[in-house]
Image (cartoon, rainbow, N blue to C red):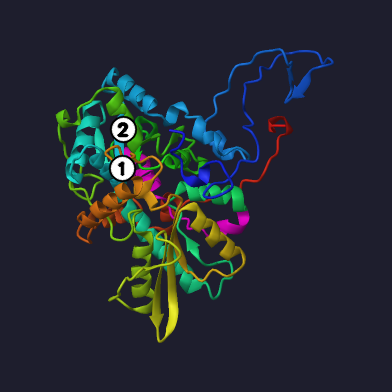
Amino acid sequence: MLGGFSSGLKLTDLNDFITPSQECIKPVQIPNKNKTKDKGLIEIEGSSLQPEETYEKAKITLNDCLACSGCITSAEVVLVNQQSLEQFSKVLNENSHLSDEDKSVIVLSVSTQSVLSIAARYNLTPQEGLEKIVGYFKSVGVDYVFDVNFARCFSLIEAQKEFAKRYRNSENDSSLVFPLLASSCPGWVCYAEKTHGSFILPYISKTRSPQQVMGSILKDYWSKKLLLKPNKLYHATLMPCFDKKLEASREEFYNSDFDTNEVDCVITSVEVEQLFEKDGIDVNTIPCMPLDTEFSMCQTLLSHDGSGSGGFAHHVFIYAAKHLFDIEEIDLNWKTLRNNDMLELTLEVNGEKVLRFAIANGFRNIQNLVQKIKRNKCPYHYVEIMACPSGCLNGGAQIRPNDGRTSKELVQYLESIYKQLPKITSQNEQRINELYSEWLENDDNDIQQKLYTTYKEITQNVNPLGIKW
């Protein structure tokens, strides 16, 4: 699992990665003992540390990793209990032994990218892969399985509105800077907060990612419908990306009143493969079961138009052309720039380029983009950013090929399958509109609170005891 996090969260300063500034600042638990000061003792936060003493290891949570300004890469090697497949299995097992009135409702939200990865690994069609995933997890105690595409519709709608509002108001408000940078990739967001801080944060979209929109829907809206406290609804997600574990643990998505996260656990495509291998599960024997429809577009695996990362640039561009310039018929001809992970799309009106959009995947392209922004030479209005080359279909937690194909060939296959999936249409979105009215009451304050988020600069905090000499 060490290789699974996005390139923004790994070691080396030569290509797609960043380097930590110091060693982990919480290597041990220092017992709080009453000791008199003596020569040879080191005072640390009120405790005396003697070189010959042995101390307990401290548990480092993902929240610690996000709060730490030095060693972001500890997230790769410290897999905490609440974000592991083992913990998810433990929750399922414990829940099965409780009385009906004490049980939690357990929900799994699955991403299309993960479904395609698992389906490809076991030579299944996308629909078979989906129904096998539903069948397996329901057989081990999950109550409901939903499609994250439902929540992605909210993210896309709000991303469209956010961009159009910024474009309209930018002439009168100098704080509304361009480009607006997509924020659904947690590896990119974490890198931005730690490396570029207050400079880059005003550029980043505040729309929540689909994972966190789903958490908001389930813990705020559906728990009330079920007459449950939010902490009695356990929400796990199946994602193509280990960085989603970091996102789920952010304090912005924690409900202190009920001591619960909006997403309790993130499991990944490769972890499901490891589970099946470890337990000797024959996928062919898993019963096929359909998605639950309360928060799924339908029981068929669907995708959004645009990139395999969810199509943010595609949807925002079409919306902006229509609502800002009254243009509905557009030829979306993306132009490849320096590599296949750097694409550009423009809209001209009366010979003037009024919209310039880009897709930037992979850390090299992200670094180049940020440097252009810093030099005030970035020409774009909106950029869809993903830390992984080829985007989410090539996420760090996707299953790697074992059938002779190269990784590049597998990603190309997944991209072709993704494009062939049925697309979500306005007819599918009727339930989305119902929730805007029923849950959010079409109130701007509610929408801001439940569909948007905030970011924070994380400054360097050098701890001399943590430095390797």
Judging depth in this view, the residue of 303 and 386 nearest the camera is 386
* Residue on which the image places disc 2: 272
Residue occupying the point 35% across, 32% down: 271
Quarter location, residue 30: top right
Instruction: Please report whichever mark, 2 or 1, sits nearer to the chain's N-terminal start.
Output: 1
Q: Where does the image place residue 70, in percent across and percent down from the top left?
A: 63, 39
Q: Secondary structure at mark 2?
A: helix
What amino acid type is highlighted by mark number 2? Val
Q: Where does the image place residue 435, in percent across and percent down from the top left?
A: 29, 52
Query: Which circle marks residue 314 in the picture?
Result: none
**Residue placed furthest toward the bottom:** 350
Task: Report the span colored magenta.
Answer: 198-223
What amino acid type is highlighted by mark number 1? Ser
Q: Is residue 220 magenta?
A: yes
Q: Where does the image place residue 391, in percent across and percent down from the top left?
A: 39, 52
Q: Secondary structure at mark 1?
A: helix
202 with respect to 407 (left or right) = right
Classify 343 as above or below 55: below
Say whether residue 456 is visible: no
Residue occupying the point 57% across, 65% down: 372
Q: Are marks 2 and 1 in contact (CB under 8 Å)?
A: yes
Q: Residues within 10 Å of mark 2 (few under 14, many from 20)?
A: some
Q: Where does the image place residue 16, in percent across and percent down from the top left?
A: 51, 49
